[in-house]
Structure formats: structure tokens, C-alpha cells
Amino acid sequence: MVSGLVDADSYKVCRGGNIDKKISVKKLAIHPLKDGGTEEQEIEADQQNRQTLTDEQIFQLERIGRKIEEHFGYPQDIEWCLADDRFYIVQSRPITTLYPVPERPDSYQESRGNHVYVSVGHQQMMTDAIKPLGLSLWQLIAFRPMFKAGGRLFVDVTQQLASPASRKTIIDVMGEHDPLIKDALMNIIERGDFIKSLPDDKEGLSPIGSSKGKSAADIQAQIKNDPAIVLELIRRSETSIATLKQNIQTKSGSDLLDFILDDITQLKKILFDPQGFSVIKAATDASSWINENMMNWLGEKNAADVLSQSLPNNITSEMGLALLDVADVIRPYPQVIAYLQQVKDDNFLNELATFEGGQETRDAMNAYLSKYGIRCAGEIDITKTRWAENPAALVPLILGNIKNFEPNAGNRRFEHGQQGALKKEQELLARLKQLPDGEQKARETKEMISLLRNFIGYREYPKYGIINRYFVYKQALLKEAELHVQAGVIRDKEDIYYLTFEELRQAVRTHEIDQKLISKRKDEHKLYEKLTPPRVITSDGEIITGKYDREGLPAGTIAGLAVSSGVVEGRARVILNMEDAALEDGDILVTTFTDPSWTPLFVSIKGLVTEVGGLMTHGAVIAREYGLPAVVGVENATKLIKEGQRIRVNGTDGYVEIV
């Protein structure tokens, strides 16, 4: 088997006592010789499809395996042999790479039967392991139950898949998030035996509907096309956060934890505000309408990509351009640049004043941090270090901007995107007017473009609001933790990261913390960091994988999801940590995932490839706004593409070529 000369049978003992069998064709047998060594023998044709073990032996092996696992307390990789109708165990070792099944509390009303779980991290563009405090806080703000497994969160989609009424909706929605998730779910449905279908009148939990197929009138009816609505939503969010910052200063002890819990209720109201939801839904619907109809009427593929460049009120894309402005402040001062090249710690801001231009640099960086310092890589985990806590993380990006760009690059880039979007709009409208009913088509298209440009930028704002609140919570919790360090209750203030929010609440109330539990959680987190989370996993622990339809793709290309149109060729830079980025202008970024903190890197690249992502996830949205060809959801991209290779990214058709 190890050499590949023969293939093994596969037996899976299922719930209820059934055996799922995959019997291999066996043309060759290897037998031991009496005096040592082995010999090969061909198997007779009528014996080649024979099951190697009897059902009774399979059940016996299953019982032995469970007994060994129970003894060691962990899933085991077990080697065995069969001699004279007796099993002998020759080795057992822990399986450290086996992904655990999501934990469901007994109180969960849908706890019985088979379940299908979808990764939250793949939708949030953050697949790293999250510490317990981060997991529990994200669970608190979620609008539906989320379950922990391997330091990540998963949602149970069993009810939606079982319901004929909601099945198509969730498949379509997941397809927009991540086509590989969609294909994996389709695989489960096509099996027909894992999930029992509900009667037509019993709908599962209904997700957000798909945008496909809506008319222009339906989309316009959702909300008034007025950009002032977005400005008011932003103003309300800023006011709410300012109030939070003021009120939380007076809280400590149990009052602080209770206050944060109450404020999370306020956060959820803002997050799921009907008007904000309508703004985002109308914009995404308009984008889908434009793509569908421009393809049908003009044969124009992904027309909304160019129309989405340089949008107003996109807090994330503005963040990348704003760092170019910081670079412009520093550019005239060689002493400051030389000093920044030697920066090792976070105290550099205080020492800047000793250099010519140091105060100007410090003011520019502090202004940037006051607005964007709440962000960091993996920001949905409250325990991650923010830029405001570690401003040195921004220094390589600033130095890269000074090296790669001329002054005023931020304004020029934004204006270039605006002009490109306007030119594309004028071109589309002119072509439409030449068609039958062209004037009507052009009017509808112009309104959809207006909706898109007025509203789609706001899509990035709700998460910015969450992360703003997170930082306020974090500062208050660490201040409280420091008091417990001084009182000898905990050893280090960051030990609170390894407690859930409710456990921390209890510890603050009782002034007692289980240090052994914290040590155990630290060890578990180190293990979880080594695991690769699946997109889809079942309650049996089976990881379901999806694949792309390669029809029409050139041979030898690497398939992915086309999210930002255009074709670009350049040097691949395979970067796993943002802090390690040393990009040259024109590089193509290849990475596992990007969240908003990666946006400042986008100004230096000319193409993007990620392993995780969908049409409306962060990397895709910003790539379109910056006009970068992008392909996301490329499985194993950071392994298949080597650092420094020349690659071609086709963001129109969704594939990558190594050239």
C-alpha cells in the first residue's frame, strides 16, 4: 500500500451499524517467504473484487479502535495486522491534524441527527485560530448560533439544506461567498442519505436572499437613492461610539462586564439596522443587475467591476490611500526615513521629535492611528494586537510607499479610478442606446450605476463599527485585568484572552481564576494554530470539499473565482503575514486571506490571488475599487505558486497561470 503497488479497501462504520464500503480492485498480492523477504502473486480475476475483511472483522476492528481512543483520550492513528484470524495492534499514535467536530451544547434545539457546518472564518476572511475571549465575543454579536471547533467558529446549515423552500437560497448565497462551499454543500445534497428532507411547508432558517434575477424596479423600491442616507448612518455610528467611550470610563468590576454585555445589544441594533441593511442590499443587487444585464444585452462581462472603482464613503479603501498621504508627509525628511528604517519597538513615536520633520511625522501618524489604529490582521479576534498598540507594524508599509510612489499618489489613484468608472458608464450607456428599447435600457442602467456608486462603499462600514467598539471593550478589559494582576488573581493581564466572556465575568465577580484552565487553553490554542479549518464539516467529522468547474479554462491553469476583472502579469510575492511584506511596485500578492488591515498593501500591487474569499468579501471589494485584477478562493495557492515566479492573473475568467 505504501509503495502504491496495491490499493486498500475503505470501510466506514456509520451510525446505526451500517458499513460504507469502497472495495478496490486487487490484481496483485504480496506474500511473505518462509526464509524472509516477499514475493508478488497475481490474483485470479474472479477474486479481484473480493472484500478483504468480513463484516464481523470490520465491526471487531471498530470496537478495538474505540477502546484504544478511549484509553488515550484522543483520536488515534492505529496500525494493525491480522494473523490466524486474530488482530494484533502494532502501533497507535495521536492524530494531531484531525479537525474536531463543532461543539453543540445540549440545550441546542437542533442537536439530534446529522448536521452540516459551514466555516465562519472563510466568510469573514480570517481562518486563523481565535482565542476563547475572541470566539465568545463574536458569538455574542452573531445573529444566529455559532459553534466552536479547533479555535474557529461554524454555523449549522442543516435546517436550510433540509428545507426545499430555503435550500436553493442558501446554495446561491454560499456561492456568492465561496464557490467551493457551494459545491461541497451540493455534494451533500446529491448524496440524498445524510440529511432528511423536510416537508415543503417546514422552512428552515431563511438566510439573506440571492441578488440574481431582480428587476430594476424591485431594486429601486428597496430604498430611496439618496447618498445622504449613508452619511447619516455613518454619523449615527460615530455618535454611538463616542458615547460608548465616555460612558465606559466610569465602569469597573462586574459593572464593566455587565455594561459591555448591554452595549453588545446596542451594537447588534446598529449592525442589523434595517436602513443600513437596505443600503447594502440595494447596492449588491444593483451590482448583480448590472453584471447580468450588461452580459445579456452587450456581451460585457463583469461590467460592475470598473464601475466600482474609487467609490465614496468606503472606509477601508480610504485607509490604504491615507497611508500614501502619511508617506508624503515623511518623504522630504531623510533623517526621519533613516530612523524609521531602524525601528524595532513601539517607542519610536516618542523619539521622532529629535529629528527634523519628526514632529510632522508624529502628527501625521497619530492622525492616521486615531482613525485606523483600531485595525490589525485578524481583527475579528478582539485579542489581536491593534496598530494603535503596535504602530511599528505600519512602518514597513510607509517606507514601501515612499520608495514605490511619487508624491500625491493617493489623490491621483482615486481620481484615475473615478475617471475610469465614469468613462465605463458613458461607454455602456452609449452602446445601450443603439439597441431596441435602448433608451429604456440606458435609463435603468444609469439608475443602477447611481445606486451602486452611492451605496456600495458603505458595505465596509458596519465591520469598521464593530472593530471600533471592540477596541473600546479591549482597552477597558485590559485595564480591569491589570487590577487583577496587581491583586495576585492572575499572572498576566493577557491571561484573560483564554477565558470566554462569561468565564471572565464570573472571575471578575468572584476574584478567582482557574490558572490550570488558562494553561490548558494556551496549550490547546497552540495545537489549533497548526490545524487547517475546513470549509464544510459534518457532525460525523467528515470534511466535505468542493471543486471548480474547469470547463472552458485553459489546461494547466489554477482555477479560482473571478472577482475583479482584468488580466495582469507580474512577479508573485507569496506573503503569509502582512508584517513580512516588502513589496515592489507591480508585484502580485499571493496569500491565504486578506482582511481590511491588508488594504494598505493593495496600493503597491497590481494583482491579487488568495486561497479564501468570495465575490463580496473584503479582498474582492477593495480589488475592484482599486482596479486590481483578482482571483480568490484558489485552493493551496501559497503552495502551488512559488515566491518570485512570474504569473498571469485572469480576474475576468477566474484562473492563474504560471508563465
Image (cartoon, rainbow, N blue to C red):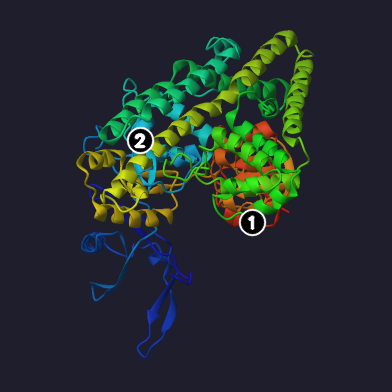
Name the residue beneath numbered marker 2: 139
Most foreground residue, 92 or 41: 92
Of residues 215 and 237, which is closer to you in this image?
A: 237
Q: Is residue 621 above or below residue 396?
A: above
- For the C terminus, the image quarter is bottom right
The answer to whether one can see residue 10 in this image is yes
Q: Residue at the spot x=69%, y=25% of the render?
A: 307
Work out whether 217 lies above or below 596: above
Tag 2: Cα neighbours inside 10 Å, few (<14), some, or many (≥20)?
some
Mark 2 and mark 1: Cα distance apart in space = 41 Å
Percent of width and height locating residue 272: 43, 22
Q: Is residue 412 left or right of residue 621?
A: right
> Could you say where residue 505 lies in the image, as x and y percent from the top left?
26, 38
Q: Amino acid at mark 1?
A: Gln
How many marks do you count on the picture?
A: 2
Q: Which residue is mark 1?
A: 342
Mark 1 burial class by Cα count in 10 Å: few <14, some 14-19, many 20+: few
Q: Position of residue 195 (x, y in %)?
A: 33, 37
* Rendered view: 5 above or below 336: below
Circle 2: residue type:
Gln
**Towards the viewer: 602 or 536:** 602
Task: Farthest residue to the front: give it.
Answer: 354
Which quadrant of the structure image shows residue 117?
A: top left
Q: Position of residue 111 (x, y in %)?
A: 25, 37
Quadrant (top left/top right/bottom left/bottom right) for the N terminus = bottom left
Q: Nearer the viewer, residue 634 or 248?
A: 248
Which structural element holds mark 2?
A: helix
N-terminal of the two: label 2 or label 1?
Answer: 2
Q: Is residue 654 visible?
A: no
Residue at horizontal 35 percent and vertical 25 percent from the top: 265
The residue positioned 79% from the left and 16% from the top of the image is 430
